[in-house]
Image (cartoon, rainbow, N blue to C red):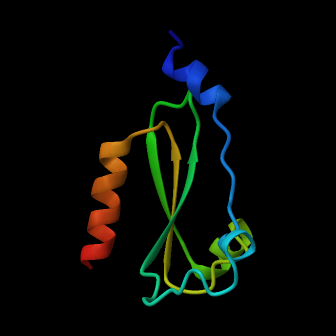
Amino acid sequence: MLSPEELRLLERKRDVDLDAIYGSGTVALSRNMKCLVLLKWRLKEEAFVVRRLRPPEALLELPCTTSGRSTEVSGGVDFPSLVRLVGDVLAT
C-alpha cells in the first residue's frame, strides 16, 4: 500500500475544456464568482498560510481571474481549515 505522500506524487491534475470535448454551449454559468481560492499547498509544509490577493495580484497568478475576491492558500495541506476559510468568505 502506498503512503499519502507516494499517492500525491502519482497524482496528475489537468484542466478540461468541456466545450472542446462535449460541444459548444455544454456549460452555461449562471452565477457570478464570489471567491477564488488558489491552492499552492506543499507536501512537506506544516503551516496553513492564507494571503488575501487584490485582483491585480490574482491576475498575475491566474490569468483568467477578472473579478471577485481572491485568496491564496499555501503551506501545509489542511482541508478542515480550507473549508472554514471558504465558508467564512462566502458568508460575508
Q: Position of residue 59 (x, y in %)?
A: 69, 76
Q: How many marks?
A: 0
Comparing 9 with 76, the one in front is: 9
What residue is shown at x 48% (from left), y 36% (from top)? 76
What residue is shown at x 30% (from left), y 44% (from top)? 80
Horizontally, is 88 left or right of 28 in the view? left
Residue closest to the far top: 1
Comparing 90 with 17, the one in front is: 17
Q: Does residue 45 sit above or below 69 in this rendering?
A: above
Task: Determine which quarter of the picture holds residue 90.
Answer: bottom left
What residue is shown at x 50% (from left), y 86% (from top)? 29
Q: Position of residue 24 (x, y in %)?
A: 69, 85
Horizontally, is 82 left or right of 21 in the view? left
Comparing 84 with 33, the one in front is: 33
Horizontally, is 6 left or right of 33 in the view? right
Q: Position of residue 38 (x, y in %)?
A: 56, 60
What residue is shown at x 53% (from left), y 31% (from top)? 45
Q: Does residue 83 sit above or below 35 in this rendering?
A: above
Residue closest to the far front: 22
Q: Position of residue 30 (x, y in %)?
A: 44, 90
Q: Does residue 9 sit above or below 39 in this rendering?
A: above
